Every structure is written in structure tokens, then in C-alpha cells.
Amino acid sequence: MKKLLLSIVGTLALVLIPMASASALDAVAGHVSQGGADVSGATVTATCKTASGGPVTTKPNGDYSLTLSPSGVCTPTDKVTVSASKGAASGQTSQPYGTGTLAEGVNIALVNVSIPEFGVIAGVSAAVLGGGAFMVIRRKHLNQN
């Protein structure tokens, strides 16, 4: 009877411990900031191999946590990529998944990624073309004299 009990406990341990480890590997947590300030309300997503998590919204202190699905896909040596955005600002980081319990401390700094307005591009282009035309005309004028 004692051997049967030990056998059952051993079998349960062999089945339950890997399941607990796999579910522990599904958590990602960190902090989102911009210019050293906490970012509340940023949208955060994460991927690791074929698993993904989010989107979640950061708390008022900039912290977030999410769960990857499907579970058990990532190992401690895999890279987790976390992206965050709020308005025109965005950021992304990748790091090894971690110790095997939690991808923790995946901190992201947001930066404004704005495209210059068309007016600035047109103004610079006009200045360059105008300068080039001036040089061509001046050269022709100097060659005639």
C-alpha cells in the first residue's frame, strides 16, 4: 500500500510540476516610462515564439502585466519582445525570457516618432533646387563673358 501511495504521489509530481512551470513561464511584467515619467494608459503587447499577450493598458504608475497564450511555449533562453504605444509615442524592447518563472522588469521607454510635415520637406527641396538652378545659370553667364 505504501508503494502504491508513493507511486501515485510520484506520478502526480511528475505531471503537476511541469504544468506549474509552464504556466509560470507565461507571465510578462514591467514598466513603461517617457522621459523618466510614468506612462499611464499606454497599450502594451508581448510576443515570444508563437505565443502572444495583450493588449493591456498600463496602470497609473506605468506598470503592466500580461499573460502569454498559448501557455508553455517559451523557455528561459527564448527572447520576449514587448511593445508599448500611447498617442504618437511608441517603444519596443527584447530580452531573454528570464529565470523560468516570470519575464520581469521588461521596461520600455516611449519616444515620439513623428514624421516631418510635408511643408518642411517641400521647403528644403525648394531651397536645394533653387540653389542648384542659381549655380547653373551663374556658370552659363560667366562662360558667356
Image (cartoon, rainbow, N blue to C red):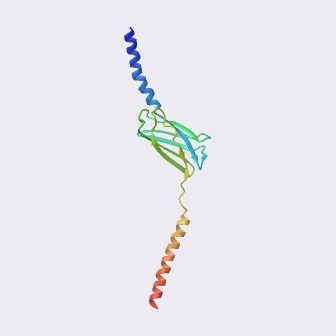
The residue sitting at 39% across, 9% down in the picture is 2
Relative to 18, does residue 113 appear above or below in the rendering?
below
Residue 58 appears left or right of 96: right
User: As drawn, which residue projects farthest toward the top?
Assistant: 1
Q: Quadrant of residue 79?
A: top left
Q: Position of residue 119 (x, y in %)?
A: 56, 66
User: As drawn, which residue projects farthest toward the front?
Assistant: 99
> Is 33 or 73 nearer to us in this picture?
33
Residue 64 appears left or right of 13: right
User: As drawn, which residue projects farthest toward the bottom?
Assistant: 145
The residue sitting at 37% across, 15% down in the picture is 7
Quarter the N terminus occupies: top left
Q: Position of residue 84 (x, y in %)?
A: 53, 45
Tally of numbered discs? 0
Q: Position of residue 88 (x, y in %)?
A: 56, 52
Q: Position of residue 31 (x, y in %)?
A: 56, 41
Relative to 34, does residue 127 appear above or below in the rendering?
below
The residue sitting at 54% across, 57% down in the picture is 114
